[in-house]
């Protein structure tokens, strides 16, 4: 049973946050001629899709983007009761000497990002890797990882969860905070 959800970002604020992040990226990467976006499966790819749309409308050019599955790079891969099903990695360009912006929806312990970095390096050696997250859950890092670009920082308890919901999947764009019952 879920406890009542608290909306952190409503559809309007989520849209504004993604647009702001797009402008921050343009300030740092100009025309994206040597920069690519790579979304971590499964939820980071939705952030990349939105950013790509905003960036392309602002810059008037196509932005190279890819999706990265990190299933086999996770440190909990063999510890889960329910086996993880891999997604499809789609990086159809070279990362060699590119500036890569690794994208995920929520940064919590840092373990997913560490797995993403390991997986990313199998595709070449970028000149630089930066991290963009829509939501940064401070105070709960297991690894010394921090984002270069953050949509919103949220202070949460260990018992709380943050969920980024997308119009295409859940019917409405929003970010919610909720507490799971301990027996789930």
Image (cartoon, helix red, strand yellow):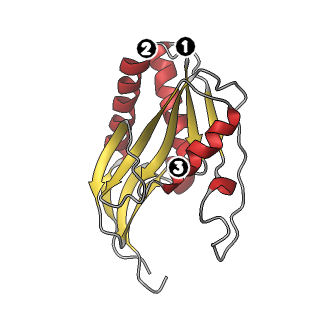
Task: Give the quarter of the image for residue 14.
Answer: top left
Please give the residue where the numbered disc 3 appears in the rendered image: 114
Give how far across and how far down residue 67 sits, in percent: 64, 39
Give how far across and how far down residue 129 sits, in percent: 50, 32
Task: Give the quarter of the image for residue 2.
Answer: bottom left
- Measured along the vertical axis of the image, is residue 3 above or below residue 177? below
Q: CA distance from mark 2 to mark 3?
A: 27 Å
Give how far across and how far down residue 148 sits, in percent: 37, 35
In-front residue for pair 114/33: 114
Q: SS of the residue at dot 2? A: loop
Crowd tier of the residue under label 2, counting other residues whose Cα lies within 10 Å: few below 14, some 14–19, many 20 or above = few
Q: In front of the other: label 2 or label 3?
A: 3
Determine contact: label 1, label 2, CB under 8 Å.
Answer: yes
In-front residue for pair 29/175: 29
Quarter placement of the N terminus: bottom left
- Measured along the vertical axis of the image, is residue 133 above or below residue 160? above
Q: Residue at x 41, y 47 (%)?
A: 145
Determine contact: label 1, label 3, CB under 8 Å.
Answer: no
Asked whether residue 43 is in view, the answer is no
Task: Indicate which disc, 2 or 3, sits on the residue closer to the N terminus.
Answer: 2
Task: Give the quarter of the image for residue 4.
Answer: bottom left
Q: Residue at x 53, y 36 (%)?
A: 48
Outermost residue toward the left? 155
Please give the residue where the numbered disc 2 appears in the rendered image: 30
Q: Residue at x 56, y 43 (%)?
A: 117
Q: CA distance from mark 1 to mark 3?
A: 26 Å
Task: Indicate which disc, 1 or 3, sits on the residue closer to the N terminus.
Answer: 1
- The circle on residue 33 is 1
- The circle on residue 142 is none
Give how far across and how far down residue 121 sits, in percent: 63, 37
Crowd tier of the residue under label 3, counting other residues whose Cα lies within 10 Å: few below 14, some 14–19, many 20 or above = some
């Amino acid at each position: 049973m879920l406890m009542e959800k608290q909306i952190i970002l409503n559809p309007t604020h989520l849209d504004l946050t993604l647009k702001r992040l797009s402008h921050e990226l343009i300030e740092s990467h100009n025309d994206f001629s040597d920069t690519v976006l790579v979304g971590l499966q499964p939820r980071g790819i939705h952030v990349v899709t939105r950013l790509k749309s905003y960036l392309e409308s602002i810059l008037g050019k196509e932005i190279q983007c890819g999706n990265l599955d990190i299933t086999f790079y996770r440190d909990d891969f063999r510890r889960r009761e329910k086996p993880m099903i891999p997604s499809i990695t789609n990086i159809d360009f070279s990362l060699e000497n590119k500036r890569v912006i690794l994208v995920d929806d929520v940064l919590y312990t840092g373990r997913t990002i560490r797995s993403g970095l390991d997986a990313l390096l199998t595709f070449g050696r970028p000149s630089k890797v930066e991290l963009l997250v829509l939501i940064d859950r401070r105070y709960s890092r297991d690894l010394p990882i921090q984002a270069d670009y953050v949509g919103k920082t949220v202070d949460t308890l260990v018992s709380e969860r943050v969920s980024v919901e997308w119009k295409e999947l859940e019917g409405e764009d929003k970010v919610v905070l909720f507490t799971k019952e301990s027996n789930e």
